[in-house]
Image (cartoon, rainbow, N blue to C red):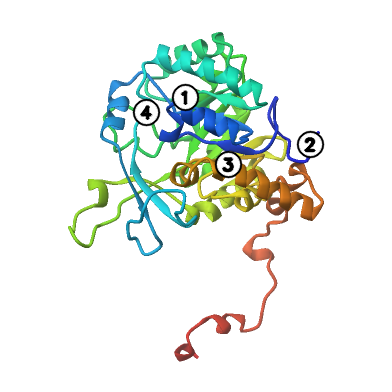
């Protein structure tokens, strides 16, 4: 077993760096580039049966923002701290064409010891199960079932879903796992007051991994136009989300126990962030915005940085998983520090 190898339920990945889905994972060229960059797994841009969801892509818009909320140039030279606000949509191909493309891409992935992951996003549950069965029949090895898109309330009715109720997450997951023999990874929303409840429901219903957690919605007023940037609310991602992701990962690990796999997503910009997410309880991590913004070298650089980190510490990826989460204490467990707070207020507060 290699130092970087990790397990997600029944499946082994050569490393825990997953190329997560976004617009750069629509084309054959993008998927191939992610595979050749050395990702342990590559998730193809999601699809479903909704024409309204596909129409969203034709109206999609994106803006890269610095830490002062100013738009900045898109490209490889962007600061890793650059954030993205976007309106997005689903894969433009019809389902049969999308599936045929996935099958071709899976052949390439297998030649690179990479796991190709098709992703279905929920619109109608019955259609979702039918499409999942077709994915399995095509010989694909795993399914990502995305019920945590940030756009559920903003999109056209019935286009996509943002599931925030634990019982609903359990029912939808069970509808998949009872019909499929391949592993199911369930992507959960971060727009919940209790993500661990959602993860427990997904695991109890047979999910082999919970992906924690989908992007949040945000709205940014433009000071020049005095209108919302991009005209509306959008999915918001960037480095700032890493502590939130690690918090949810740690709480999910505590609720599920160490035997259940978690995949961390959002806020991960490079190899050191991958290590942080692993320490918080993830067995693998997805990078989407960082790759879409700065290019596929982010993947190979992340793998190399993670490898260097593990060698410097004399540990494997398996040794990292959950180490910080398991050492996490509550506020009530922390020692008292006499007047320590006074070191962190302005002089006028004394």
Q: Earlier in the sequence, mark 2 or mark 4?
A: 2
Q: Earlier in the sequence, mark 4 or mark 3?
A: 4
In front here: 33 or 154? 33
Q: Circle 4 sits on which residue?
A: 90
Q: Is residue 85 above or below residue 11?
A: below
Calculate the distance from the C-alpha at mark 2 to the C-alpha at mark 4. 35 Å
Tags 1 and 4 touching, CB below 8 Å:
no
**Could you say whether the residue bearing mark 2 is in a helix, strand or loop?**
loop
Calculate the distance from the C-alpha at mark 4 to the C-alpha at mark 3. 23 Å
Q: Is residue 156 left or right of residue 83?
A: left
Q: Circle 2 sits on which residue?
A: 2
Q: Which mark is residue 28?
A: 1
Give the mark toward the camera: 2 or 4. Answer: 2
**Mark 1: few, some, or many residues within 10 Å (few <14, many ≥20)?**
some
**Could you say whether the residue bearing mark 3 is in a helix, strand or loop?**
helix
**Could you say whether the residue bearing mark 4 is in a helix, strand or loop?**
loop
Q: Circle 3 sits on which residue?
A: 299
């Amino acid at each position: 077993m290699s130092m970087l190898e990790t397990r997600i339920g029944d499946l082994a990945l050569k490393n825990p760096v997953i190329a997560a889905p976004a617009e750069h994972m629509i084309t054959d060229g993008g998927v191939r580039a992610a595979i050749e960059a050395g990702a342990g797994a590559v998730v193809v841009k999601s699809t479903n049966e909704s024409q309204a969801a596909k129409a969203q892509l034709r109206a999609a818009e994106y803006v890269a923002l610095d830490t002062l909320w100013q738009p900045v140039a898109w490209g490889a030279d962007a600061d890793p701290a650059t954030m993205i606000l976007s309106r997005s949509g689903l894969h433009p191909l019809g389902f049969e064409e999308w599936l045929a493309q996935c099958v071709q891409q899976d052949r390439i992935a297998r030649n690179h010891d990479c796991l190709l992951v098709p992703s279905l996003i929920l619109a109608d549950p019955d259609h979702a199960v039918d499409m999942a069965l077709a994915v399995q029949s095509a010989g694909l090895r795993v399914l990502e079932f995305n019920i945590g898109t940030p756009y559920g309330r903003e999109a056209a009715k019935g286009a996509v879903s943002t599931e925030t109720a634990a019982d609903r997450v359990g029912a939808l997951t069970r509808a998949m796992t009872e019909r499929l023999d391949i592993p199911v990874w369930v992507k959960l929303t971060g727009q919940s007051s209790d993500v661990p409840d959602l993860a427990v429901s997904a695991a109890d219903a047979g999910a082999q991994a919970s992906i924690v957690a989908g992007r949040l919605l945000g709205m940014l007023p433009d000071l020049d136009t005095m209108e919302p940037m991009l005209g509306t609310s959008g999915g918001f991602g960037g480095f700032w989300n890493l502590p939130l992701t690690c918090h949810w990962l740690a709480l999910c690990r505590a609720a599920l126990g160490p035997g259940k796999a978690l995949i961390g997503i959002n806020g991960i910009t490079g190899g050191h962030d991958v290590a942080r997410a692993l320490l918080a309880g993830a067995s693998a991590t997805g990078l989407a915005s960082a790759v879409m913004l700065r290019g596929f070298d982010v993947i190979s650089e992340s793998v190399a940085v993670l490898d260097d980190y593990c060698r410097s510490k004399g540990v494997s990826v398996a040794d990292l998983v959950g180490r910080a989460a398991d050492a996490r204490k509550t506020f009530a467990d922390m020692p008292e520090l006499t007047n320590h707070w006074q070191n962190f207020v302005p002089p006028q507060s004394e």
